[in-house]
Image: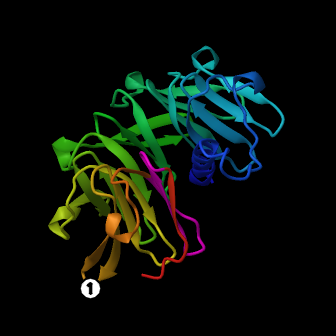
Amino acid sequence: MKRLLLFISILSLFFSDYKAYSQLYNFTNYGLEQGLPQSTVFSTFQDSRGYLWIGTESGVARFNGYQFVVFDKSSGLPGNIVRSVVEGADGYIWVGTDKGVGVFNGKRWRSITEKEGLKGSAVIKLAPDKDGKMWVATNDSGLNIVTFRDGSISIDYLNEKNGLAANFVLDILHSSDGSTWVAMIGGVNIISFVDGKPKIQNLESIVSIPSNLFSCIAEDEKKCIWLGTLDAGAFLLSKKNSGFTVIPYGEQRGISDSRIWDIYCDGENQVWFGTNDNGLYYLMDNSV
């Protein structure tokens, strides 16, 4: 839902430049006058209760379809720049900020910052796993794996010192086979756990991809993995024996922008690509 809403926002920007040449689309704009705390939106997420959460440069806004309720540092958030919002297994809302993580139980915020052992200057991505742990991606300290139960916090760390390819993490995917894929400015790692200990594998040891600037990861209905880069377009990885077959998706397949910021597989064998300069690309029938 979060990524789909992001793509809708991109579409609205794209069509606004061409409204003089094409029909008007049925978009509703929400900005400062309607209650958003800031006009720059980094993330959107809909929780299990139906609330829409919008991460901005001035806190996070909760929208019930009629009005916005804004939470920022004065409300208990550790920081105001919000790049990721998710819901944990316990139903709590987790918010990644430039100063740490805020956890909302519906009444009050609890901060997880350097004081509680969190490493990293800014949180880029949050991703809950099947065990109820929250994976926290940072811009300079790799991954924090947070366990938050009964008010107590414990954190495990994965970074360059213990095998991660790089410390600047942009995306996390908990895949259907139980492994976790991590996209970094510096490579891609595939992480699995053996007897409770992480086993980290570098993607470059399995396949050759002409980039190490990875921005996003997605998994489609066929269990294939899509990777977005910031200098070489997108790549599709399909399982083949013990490795992968790699298919590039760049100019030769119709995507003329080499910088891919987001990939969304919508569950109907269709793939969406958010690019840096050329808006949105839509692969209608992923039959490869």
Q: Position of residue 187 (x, y in %)?
A: 23, 53
Instruction: Report the label total.
Output: 1
Q: Position of residue 13 (x, y in %)?
A: 59, 42
Residue type at the position of mark 1: Asn
Farthest residue to the bottom: give it. 241
Q: Specify whether residue 249 is in view.
A: no
**What residue do we see at 79% from left, 38% from top?**
64
Q: Is residue 192 left or right of residue 152?
A: left
Q: Secondary structure at mark 1?
A: loop
Vertical position of residue 51 compared to residue 60: above or below: below
Vertical position of residue 134 compared to residue 180: above or below: above
**4 part of magenta stretch:** no
Farthest residue to the top: give it. 74
- The part of the image, by quadrant, that contains residue 38 is top right
Picture quarter with the C terminus: bottom left
Q: Nearer the viewer, residue 86 or 168?
A: 168
Q: Which residues are magenta?
A: 262-278
**What residue do we see at 57% from left, 27% from top?**
110
Q: Position of residue 201 (x, y in %)?
A: 22, 62
The way the protein has been coloured in the rendering is rainbow
Picture quarter with the N terminus: bottom right
Q: Which residue is mark 1?
A: 241
**What residue do we see at 60% from left, 20% from top?**
72
Q: Nearer the viewer, residue 233 or 165?
A: 233
Q: Position of residue 275 (x, y in %)?
A: 44, 50
Q: Specify whether residue 13 is in view.
A: yes
**275 part of magenta stretch:** yes
**What residue do we see at 20% from left, 49% from top?**
165
Q: Is residue 151 left or right of residue 33?
A: left
Q: Is residue 138 left or right of residue 149?
A: left
